[in-house]
Each structure stands twice: as C-alpha cells, then as structure tokens.
Amino acid sequence: MPAHIDITPAPDELAGIHALLDSLDSALPFLVSVSPSQVKALFKLGPRSEAFVQKAIIAAEQNGRLVPPSISLAAMRRDAALRAALRPIRMRVATLLELLDGTMLLAGADLMKLSSQVYRVLQISGTGEGIEDLLEDLGKRFAKRRKPAPASSQESPLLNDSAHRFRREPL
C-alpha cells in the first residue's frame, strides 16, 4: 500500500512559515490565554446566545434611561465589535489547523505503518543477531495494559449501586 502522504517542505519554506507565524503573533498582541478553571467559571456566549446578545444591545440602546450606569453599553459594543472582527480570523486559523492536523495525522499513520514493518522484519530476521534488547524495547509499544479488577464487589460502589442508580424513572 502506498504512503498516505509524500511531502518534504524545503528548509526555506519552513523558515518562511515560521516568519509568518512570528508576524501573525506580533500582529495579535491583544490575544489572551484562559486557563481551564477560568473557562469553567465564565458565563459563556455560545451560538444559541448570539441573537440574545444582539437584542440586548439594541434594547439597551433604545432604553438607555432604564439601564443603570454600572452596565456599560460602550463595553458591550466594544466586545461585540471585537468578536465580529475576530470571527473570520478564527475561521481561517481553524481551517489551517484542520489542514495541519490532517497532514500530521497522515504522516503519523505512515510512520506507524513503516515502523511496525521494521519491527516485524527485525523480529523475523534479527534472531541471533544480538538485538534482543532492542526488540524488547520496541515491543513495549504493543504490550497490553491490564486494568486491575476490584478485589471484591464491596470495594466498588458502582457494582453495588448500579442497579438502581441508572434506572430510568417513569415519566
């Protein structure tokens, strides 16, 4: 079976890509990183809430006398404009990331296929050649990992409780 992918970028192409990435990074100094715990704590704006947010901005504009000064309409407009400006950039970057991931996946699949062939060939033709340690090390990739079974059903609350915990209640 032929290789999934056969690409060799030239060193100057890779250098150019890194330079473009450096330029892109410099052009976006306002981007911020958010930790998983911060993400979890945020009140997130998902696709289903986009219309709600737009309507809330319009409602605040039309009824400004009812909105307390602690709610900044200017901040709402600024954040909406930022999201609108970043959305097409994000879409392009996401497309590039999909292409990058696909290319790496295919290169990895080719590597695994060929590496497995090398391992099998060495297993067959390497007998008595002094490569036993090498074969043992390569074979660790295929060693099966076994999950330890619970010593008794009393130690596993899921085993004792599962019969009634996952029962559907009648509607």
Image: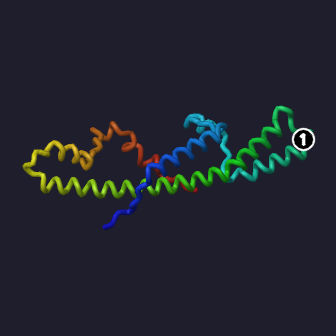
Foreground of the two, 77 or 68: 77
Residue at the spot of label 1? 64
In percent of the image, x 16 and y 42: which residue is there?
133
Answer with the quarter of the image where residue 150 lies. top left
**Residue most extreme to the left:** 128
Quadrant position of the N terminus in the picture: bottom left
* Residue plotted at (45% across, 47% down): 164
Number of numbered discs overlaid on the protein picture: 1
Type of the residue with mark 1 = Gly
Residue placed most toward the observer, 162 or 116: 116
Q: Is residue 24 left or right of residue 121?
A: right
At which x and y percent is residue 158?
A: 39, 43
Q: Residue furthest right?
A: 65
**Left or right of 139 on screen, residue 38:** right
Mark 1 Cα-neighbour bin, 10 Å: few <14, some 14–19, many ≥20 = few
152 left or right of 52 in image: left
Farthest residue in the top direction? 70
The x, y position of residue 88, in whole percent, is: 67, 53
Pinpoint residue 130: horizontal percent, then vertical percent: 10, 45
Taking the view exactly as shown, the residue that stands out farthest to the front is 12
Q: Could you tell me residue 4's position as x and y percent?
A: 38, 63
Q: Quadrant of the C terminus?
A: bottom right
Please state which of residues 153 and 50 is positioned toward the viewer in this rendering. 50
